[in-house]
Amino acid sequence: MPAEIVAVANHKGGVGKSFTAVSMASGMAHAGWRTLLVDCDAQANATSMFDPNDEVEFDLLDVIVGGVEVAKAVITTRVPGLDLLGASLDVARLDQELITRHYREEQVRRALAPLLENYDVMVLDLSPNLGQLVITALNAATGLIVPTDASRWGRRGVAMFLEWAEELRRADVLRAELLGVVLTKYEAGTRISREVRDDLHAGPWPMFNTLIPKRVAAERMVAELRVVGDPEADLDLSQAYANLTAEVLERLTASIARRGRHARV
């Protein structure tokens, strides 16, 4: 069956979005799902975890605007079962390029279409804004995950982002099921983290039960290019993201079944 496309998105920066996308994609691959991580962010943070020298030959700009065959833009990573369609700073040009193109909301979906049968899931790491590339990537998605940090501004940002997403849904641009909101940088010993947690769980959106703890080790993992599954990865973060991945795959399988497609076993 064609791949599911899961967008990891939030217009607020600093919420652990790229780290979550990378960790979840790695976890899915370790779980036996053929996974493609698609970096849709010109900051290329997800790409840098596997290509620290910024040697990306082709990215989404080359595929959508330059007509490069999408398979040529895909590279293998050190994680078995995980491939990467990387990004470079040139991806920033896509916002303007897409605005001038016919059927602009369909461009990412069309770009990825030749690869759909090669993977079980594609994870899209979107940039922290509400630009045209984010809209176009959301249009391609079948599932949506929204990370947020355990702060009052983070809680406010989730509400704003999902209200905007509902506008896209009403315009029939966004069709992806909201798989859930995931709380990152959680500190059980702080009142604000607990209040944000309780507030979000009492809200109208589906929440993941897994709480991603705040760890200085996350910065070390990024600096040392360690991802979930690497022997040197932080154990607490690895366990948390393993738990989150299991939740995501369970909800993704249920979503597939609701849409009448054959669920993975």
Image (spheres, grey):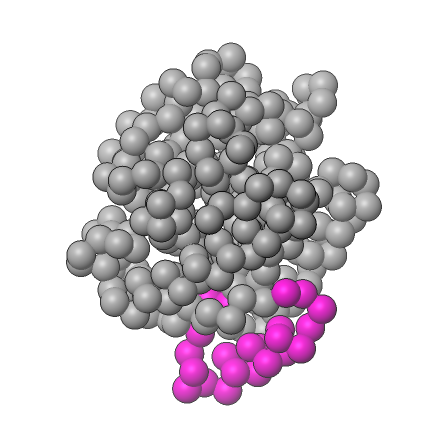
The x and y percentages for residue 74 are 37, 26
Quadrant in the picture for residue 95: top right
Q: Nearer the viewer, residue 54 or 228?
A: 228
In this rendering, position of residue 194 left or right of residue 83: right
In this rendering, position of residue 144 left or right of residue 103: left
Considering every residue shown, the one lying at the far top of the view is 67
Image mark count: 0
Q: Which of 240 and 254 is in front in this view?
A: 254
**Residue found 66% across the figure and 37% down from its top:** 139
Q: Can residue 178 be seen in this view?
A: yes
**Residue found 57% across the figure and 77% down from its top:** 196
**Residue found 43% across the figure and 83% down from its top:** 188
Quadrant in the picture for residue 6: top right
Q: Is residue 188 magenta?
A: yes
The x and y percentages for residue 160 are 69, 59
In the image, residue 44 above or below residue 197: above
Q: Is residue 9 visible?
A: no
In this rendering, position of residue 52 left or right of residue 102: left
Magenta-highlighted residues: 183-206
In the image, residue 122 above or below residue 155: above
Considering every residue shown, the one lying at the far right of the view is 170
Quadrant in the picture for residue 100: top right
**Residue found 59% across the figure and 60% down from its top:** 180
Q: Does the magenta stretch include residue 25?
A: no
Q: Nearer the viewer, residue 247 or 92?
A: 247
The x and y percentages for residue 77 are 28, 36
The x and y percentages for residue 123 are 48, 42
Q: Which of 245 and 8 is in front in this view?
A: 245
